[in-house]
Amino acid sequence: MRLLSALIFILFMTANLFLHAQELPVYSQYLFNPAFINPAAFGTSNDCAYLSKVKKQKKQKKKAYIYNYTNYMLTDRHQWLDIPGAPNTQAFALDIRQNNVGLGLVAMNDVNGATFRRGVSLAYSYRTIRTDKLDDPQLSIGISLEAYQFGINTTNLFNTPELMNDPLALAAGKSMFLPDASAGALLFTDNFHLGFSVAQILRPTLNYDPKSYTFNFLDRDFFLNAGYTFPVTELSSIELSGLIKSTQNINMQYDITPKWIYNKNFWVALSYRTQTGGSDLMLLTGYRLKYLSIAYAYDYAFQGLGNSHELMISYTVCRVTTKSNTSKAIPCKDPSK
């Protein structure tokens, strides 16, 4: 309980340190893949490590196994379906763990009205605490180097004589290449996590008109997220988590999410998000069958912008080192059985 009290205190006190804009893509299922908001989360998944759930072993000392893995993930998100030109995002993520090192690759396409953002990011993380037990605290520190192409496609939106001399209309079809970086830290056990990350560290400048002296800097995004899992029965548990997202000089976004997990294979979550302009209620669910996981999120916007849908599919290959120091692929199952 002391850990939970400290978690709640940190979440709400740190909120006063940050000042929110939607420049980065919004993912509802960051709980399913926290690497979307924190590069330190690459290489930290416990999907390939199952604690024994046999009732007769309840009073015995639990053994934990942690395997290296490679995870492939596809995400497709469509926001505010009732609004033409509303944001939609597609992403492919590769998450690799090799001992204490995590490697990540994310390829992303984000379209928001007349603007688009496409690019890739490469991430590296390192777990500074060596352990082979899930109950032991571990600290991961990560950094991500990114390259994005920003562009404007305003042909259909500004095809009127009155706007032919507008700088934004004249920039239609133009694009620019911008480098950027993200960094973060993640403290976690099998039932607790606390992470902090900063995105758009370099604050790249968007300026489509070379004759203009106005520079549009992308604000840094700050993320603080934490969660704690409480056992309910032998096979089920509830995770309570929260997220604070903010940008410089703008209001904050809060997410509060209770998540019910059954047998580590099925989960349902209800999340409430409050942000500038209104609030959302999100229903998330997912199921894992050995290698394959499928998750879905439905967002209801109270401010009348329309509903959002997000689908995520992932495939995990676990690897274990044998006595001959070789590796082989195995299914994600309880290795103690």
Image (spheres, helix red, strand yellow):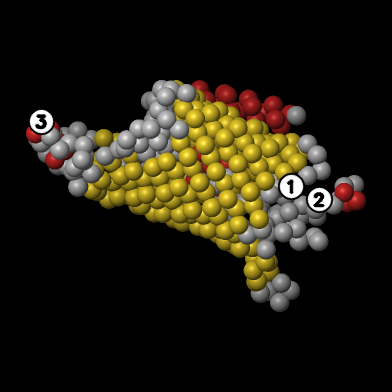
| Disc assigned to residue 47 | none
Residue 96: quadrant of the picture: bottom right
x and y, in percent, of residue 279 in the image:
48, 24
Confirm whether residue 201 shows in the render: no
Three-letter amino acid code of the residue under disc 3 = Glu
Q: CA distance from mark 3 to mark 2?
A: 68 Å
Q: Nearer the viewer, mark 3 or mark 2?
A: 3
Q: Is residue 218 above or below residue 180?
A: above
Three-letter amino acid code of the residue under disc 1 = Asn
Circle 2: is it few (<14), some (14-19), or many (20+) Cα within 10 Å? some
Residue for point 81% across, 61% down: 337
Q: Nearer the viewer, mark 2 or mark 1?
A: 1
Residue at the bottom extreme? 324
Three-letter amino acid code of the residue under disc 2 = Lys
Residue for point 70% across, 30% down: 4
- For numbered disc 2, what is the local secondary structure? loop
Find disc 3 in the rendering and name its residue. Answer: 162
**Residues tagged 2 and 1 counted as in contact (Cβ below 8 A):** yes
| Disc assigned to residue 53 | 2
Q: Is residue 168 above or below residue 321?
A: above
Find disc 1 in the rendering and name its residue. Answer: 263
Residue for point 57% across, 58% down: 315
- For numbered disc 3, what is the local secondary structure? helix
x and y, in percent, of residue 109 in the image:
37, 49
Q: Is residue 68 left or right of residue 80?
A: right
Q: Earlier in the sequence, mark 3 or mark 1?
A: 3
x and y, in percent, of residue 327 in the image:
65, 71
